[in-house]
Image (tube, rainbow, N blue to C red):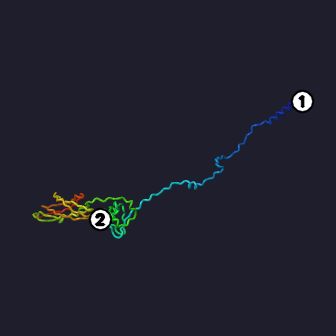
Amino acid sequence: MKRRHLIFTFIFVVYISACNMPGATATEIPSTQPTLDIPITGGTTPTAVPIETLLQVVELPTATSTSTPSVTLASAREQPVNCRFGPDVSYAIVGALIVGRQAEVIGKNIDVTWVYVRNPSDPSTNCWLYVDLLNLEGNVDLLPVVGSPEIMVTGIRVSIEPPAMNVACDAFPQSVIITAEITTNGPSIVTWYWESSVGITSAQKQVLFEAGDTKIVQDYYQMDRAGDYSIRVHSILPNLTAGEATFKAICTP
């Protein structure tokens, strides 16, 4: 009896000890949101800066527009102004700027006494206006300096008088008058001569031009028989150019 009591007591003690031993238990991990650690300097909390403030701090480069220089214009002051081939009154008149109209200025001579413009009478060509007779709008200092043009014969117009004749076949030789209108753009001495279609040429002649102008020169041509003829008038100096006219002679037996 006593032995059973001891066994019972032993079992009881073992049971009590097992209850008091530490066991493995599940530990619940608290769920927290991830945070961003922002370093704090001087113990102050940083504040958000508006984007408008940042744009004011950073100066962005701005595009600058380059303005095109305005066109220089010339207008007549009180009366029409002759537009000449060159910057001097000795050059031929090739146009005119009337009051109330304007001409685009594209150049000047070296002492700015004349300006080079688009011809008011023919914008496809250019000519010169005398500054003292003009009102100028724009910056003349920016205009390029343009040299004087070369003086030359610009045209020769030839006519024959009479342009046709009908004479007796035994009335030859007969003569016709050669008339040539020679035009220059400035003062010059023009050397010229004529040549016929049958190979006869005249001696060289000269005519003085004190200014750009048109002058008339004349000579005669003598033919020995009937036929169709042409006369060509040539200039040699200051440049080579020519003009031509035709005529005919008819004879009746």
Q: Which residue is at a point 63% across and 51% down the rendered structure image? A: 46
Amino acid carrying label 2: it is: Val
Residue 49 seen in the current view: yes
Q: Mark 2 packing: few (<14 Cα in 10 Å), some, or many (20+)?
A: some
Q: Mark 1 packing: few (<14 Cα in 10 Å), some, or many (20+)?
A: few
What is the residue that sits farthest to the right in this orientation?
A: 1
Coordinates of residue 117 in the picture (x, y in percent): 34, 62
Q: Earlier in the sequence, mark 2 or mark 1?
A: 1
Coordinates of residue 104 in the picture (x, y in percent): 37, 63
Find out whether the residues at labels 2 and 1 contact each other: C-beta distance under 8 Å. no
Disc 2 is placed on an element classified as loop
Residue holding disc 2: 89
What is the CA distance from the residue labelled 2 to the residue labelled 1? 162 Å
Q: Which residue is at a point 79% across and 36% down the rendered structure image? A: 21
Find residue 119 and name its label. Answer: none
Image quadrant holding the C terminus, namely bottom left
- Closer to us: 39 or 162: 39
Can you tell which quarter of the image residue 125 is in? bottom left
Can you tell which quarter of the image residue 85 is in? bottom left
Residue 117 seen in the current view: no
Can you tell which quarter of the image residue 118 is in? bottom left
Amino acid carrying label 1: it is: Lys
> In this image, 59 relative to 224: left or right?
right
Find residue 2 and name its label. Answer: 1
Q: Which residue is at a point 35% across and 59% down the rendered structure image? A: 145
